Image: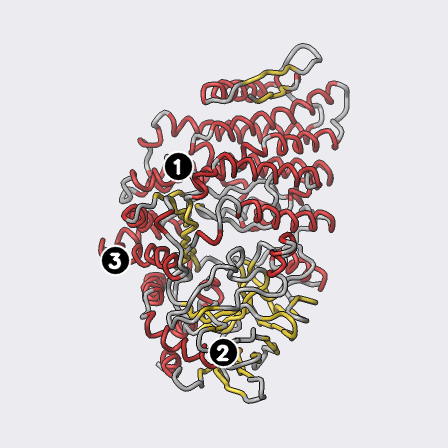
């Protein structure tokens, strides 16, 4: 049972007392509450606040909410099924137009505009509220009564505070309104977390999956059924997949799902104890996803597909999304609001969110144990995004940054009690989208070729590289030209080289495509400077990214994206360090996929490659957790039968004595491309050296085949 407080002025009540209703949970009651809220929105038409700027805001947001309600009714009464493609496109544009780049300067969603209108305090607060309200679009199409109802009630409660204060000739106290939002996020924390968790692990019904499996995918009107923003990118992607033969679709989907299955087999995990797999993908790939769902069902796995809404009430500091989503209307808008949780974040709020995580885990403990992990389709080719600094965007304080990083670790530990890492697996594959340019179809075909390269050939060559690496005490990595990387990477001691190895021979299973060998370095003695002239990480561009290490941990960093070094440091701190004071090197790898490298150069798309492919086109370092986090005690073997012993470092080993200090809940790969790579040389204990790569080319005997794509 939940207690909802309707403030008197928010609902045009006649006395000065708050009216409290007790509601039992259930669709009928939620529907009744929703209708009451919509009626109250309609009754606002003839009401006006004496302060014009606030009156204009509340009426603008009210009109938007009524438009969301129209969308909800449009789906529920069957009007969607009768609408034309043009009508659906017009509706979609209308719902999202206010925050599109061309309109953003004068949108309440822009913190700068909101602060100009209301001043900083209420500017931040009301812009954040509008951001949250705009998240209802997808819920309207889903028919999610809980999120629709509670958000309308929150808006009306805040409006009621302004009405009440207006009657006394003033505006409400900022702290009073902030607390209203705070308690909304706190009071509904469990429900929010349970809904999201269930969407991931419970397979009975699923909004996105059920559309994918039941819709006529040749009728592209289905693209609008999810409520996501739709552009030519999504339409042309769907058109391209529809142009492929069923055999070609089967090949795409099977490469994807076989990677998932083989991932379990290669790590000695039992896939037969799992009953669900979580699919992550972008709108437009439904034909491939439909076949992937069928493939997974053939091995007794039901699919779940989670939505990827952004919320100011979630504890996060990133604009990146995971799950299912359509086009991003305005990446700057998302970036500007990524730290809105600064409005609420305190120790009590963190505790409440962690309690909610435990409650969700307990509620769906059985389903969580049967969840096999994610299968992810990433896309690339979109216009690169380099964010602008919005001086009025909310920023976490130093204390809040510490709370956030601690929360990430604690939340990860809690989730590992329910979705046990050592029992689950994953797979990731990438495809281009039409925005990549006129060569889209050719690049798509080239990507399919890259994703299906002969893994046995790479496995054999990579083993030759591993054999040399296993002779070394450390590895030297140097840049060339404008790249001034100079790194020394310490390796674990092998006690029995006949049975043990430091490096995993990675082919096309969890990380598609083929092409890397990787290890978890020893931190002590690992040192130097990692530099790349330009790189995209999680969709964000870094110019002249430079990170310095001592004993394997970050001691300094900078980039030249911004006018000041301070802005550059904050950018890296927010999006690579995720507010940790430092991070260790969790992975050192050598990428071997020269085919992908050549394709990237040939079509001038190197700056658009996802890290999944980019990490195979040169050596890379990952900062954060190792590749074996939470499953360090699970012994894995290379195809040659040797056990991979480099699964820990000096920080992750703390899991045995102080788990809170063992993990960081992040892992960011940074690649040096071959054309910036001077050398990779292995140094043995006796000082003897073996060079693997020199001036961007493989020079180790037995690896010459890898140079052929670069010579063609």
Q: Which residue is pictured at 35% across the width and 64% down the height?
A: 451
Secondary structure, mark 1, is helix
**Around disc 3, counting alpha carbons within 10 Å, would you say few (fewer than 14), some (14 to 19), or many (20 or more)?**
some
- Is 359 situated above or below 296? above
Q: Earlier in the sequence, mark 3 or mark 2?
A: 3
Q: What residue did someone put label 3 on? A: 248
Residue 459 in picture, x, y percent from top left: 37, 73
Picture quarter with the N terminus: top right
Secondary structure, mark 2, is loop
Camera-side residue of 556 and 331: 556
Query: In this rendering, does residue 370 appear at all?
Result: yes
Q: Residue furthest front?
A: 496
Q: Quadrant of residue 210?
A: top left
Residue 574 in picture, x, y percent from top left: 64, 55
Camera-side residue of 352 and 6: 352
Q: CA distance from mark 3 to mark 1?
A: 27 Å
Q: Quadrant of residue 87?
A: top left
Q: What residue did someone put label 2 on? A: 470
Camera-side residue of 673 and 657: 657
Q: CA distance from mark 1 to mark 2?
A: 49 Å
Task: Check contact, mark 3 vs mark 1: CB within 8 A.
Answer: no
Q: Quadrant of residue 90?
A: top left
- Is 552 situated above or below 364? below
Q: What residue did someone put label 1 on? A: 207
């Amino acid at each position: 049972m939940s207690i909802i407080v309707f403030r008197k002025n928010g609902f045009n009540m006649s006395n000065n007392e708050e009216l409290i209703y007790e509601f039992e949970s259930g669709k009928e009651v939620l529907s009744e509450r929703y209708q009451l809220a919509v009626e109250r929105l309609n009754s606002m038409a003839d009401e006006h606040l004496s302060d014009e700027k606030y009156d204009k805001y509340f009426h603008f947001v009210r009109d938007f909410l009524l438009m969301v309600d129209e969308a909800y009714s449009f789906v529920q009464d069957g009007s969607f099924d009768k609408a034309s493609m043009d009508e659906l496109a017009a509706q979609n544009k209308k719902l999202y137009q206010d925050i599109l780049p061309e309109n953003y300067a004068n949108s309440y969603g822009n913190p700068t505009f909101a602060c100009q209108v209301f001043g900083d305090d209420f500017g931040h607060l009301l812009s954040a509220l509008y951001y949250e309200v705009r998240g209802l679009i997808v819920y309207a199409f889903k028919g999610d009564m809980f999120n629709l109802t509670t958000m309308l009630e929150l808006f009306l409660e805040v409006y009621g505070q302004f009405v009440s204060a207006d009657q006394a000739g003033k505006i409400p106290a900022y702290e009073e309104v902030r607390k209203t939002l705070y308690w909304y996020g706190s009071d509904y924390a469990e429900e929010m977390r349970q809904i999201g968790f269930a969407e991931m692990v419970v397979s009975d019904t699923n909004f996105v999956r059920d559309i994918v499996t039941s819709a006529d995918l040749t009728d592209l009107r289905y693209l609008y059924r999810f409520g996501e923003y739709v552009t030519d990118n999504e339409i042309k992607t769907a058109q391209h997949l529809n142009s492929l033969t069923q055999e070609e679709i089967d090949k795409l989907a099977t490469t994807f799902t076989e990677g998932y299955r083989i991932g379990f087999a290669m790590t000695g995990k039992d896939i037969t104890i799992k009953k669900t797999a979580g699919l992550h993908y972008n709108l437009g790939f439904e034909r491939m996803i439909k076949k992937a769902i069928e493939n997974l069902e053939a091995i007794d796995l039901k699919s779940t597909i989670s939505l990827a809404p952004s919320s100011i009430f979630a504890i996060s500091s990133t604009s990146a999304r995971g799950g299912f989503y359509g086009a991003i209307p305005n990446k700057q808008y998302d970036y500007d609001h990524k730290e809105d949780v600064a409005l609420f974040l305190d120790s009590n709020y963190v505790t409440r969110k962690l309690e909610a995580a435990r409650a969700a885990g307990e509620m769906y403990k059985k389903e969580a144990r049967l969840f096999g992990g994610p299968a992810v389709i990433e896309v690339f080719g979109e216009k690169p995004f380099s964010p602008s600094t919005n001086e009025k965007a909310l920023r976490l304080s130093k204390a809040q940054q510490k709370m956030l990083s601690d929360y990430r670790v604690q939340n990860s530990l809690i989730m590992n009690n329910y979705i046990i890492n050592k029992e689950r697996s994953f797979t990731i594959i990438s495809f281009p989208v039409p925005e990549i340019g006129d060569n889209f179809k050719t690049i798509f075909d080239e990507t399919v070729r890259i994703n299906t390269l002969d893994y046995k050939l790479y496995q054999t060559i990579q083993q030759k590289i591993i054999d040399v690496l296993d002779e070394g005490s450390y590895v030297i990595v140097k840049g060339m030209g404008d790249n001034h990387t100079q790194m020394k990477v310490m390796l674990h001691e092998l006690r029995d080289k006949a049975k043990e190895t430091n490096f995993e021979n990675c082919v096309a299973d969890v990380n598609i495509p083929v092409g890397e060998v990787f290890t978890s370095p020893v931190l002590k003695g690992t040192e130097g400077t990692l530099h790349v002239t330009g790189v995209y990480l999680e969709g964000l561009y870094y110019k002249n990214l430079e990170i310095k290490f001592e004993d394997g941990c970050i001691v300094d960093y900078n980039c030249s994206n911004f006018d000041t070094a301070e802005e550059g440091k904050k950018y890296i701190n927010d999006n690579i360090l995720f507010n940790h004071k430092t991070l260790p090197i969790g992975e050192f790898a050598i990428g071997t996929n020269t085919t992908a490298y050549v394709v990237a150069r040939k079509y001038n798309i190197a700056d658009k490659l996802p890290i999944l492919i980019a990490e195979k086109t040169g050596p890379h370092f990952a900062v954060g957790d190792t590749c074996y986090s939470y499953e360090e005690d699970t012994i894995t073997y290379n195809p040659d039968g040797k056990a991979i012993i480099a699964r820990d470092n000096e920080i992750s080993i703390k899991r045995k004595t102080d788990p809170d200090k063992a993990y960081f809940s992040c892992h960011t790969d940074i690649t040096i491309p071959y054309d910036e790579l001077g050398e990779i040389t292995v140094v043995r204990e006796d000082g003897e050296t073996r060079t693997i790569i020199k001036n961007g080319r493989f020079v180790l005997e037995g690896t010459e085949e890898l140079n052929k794509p670069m010579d063609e």
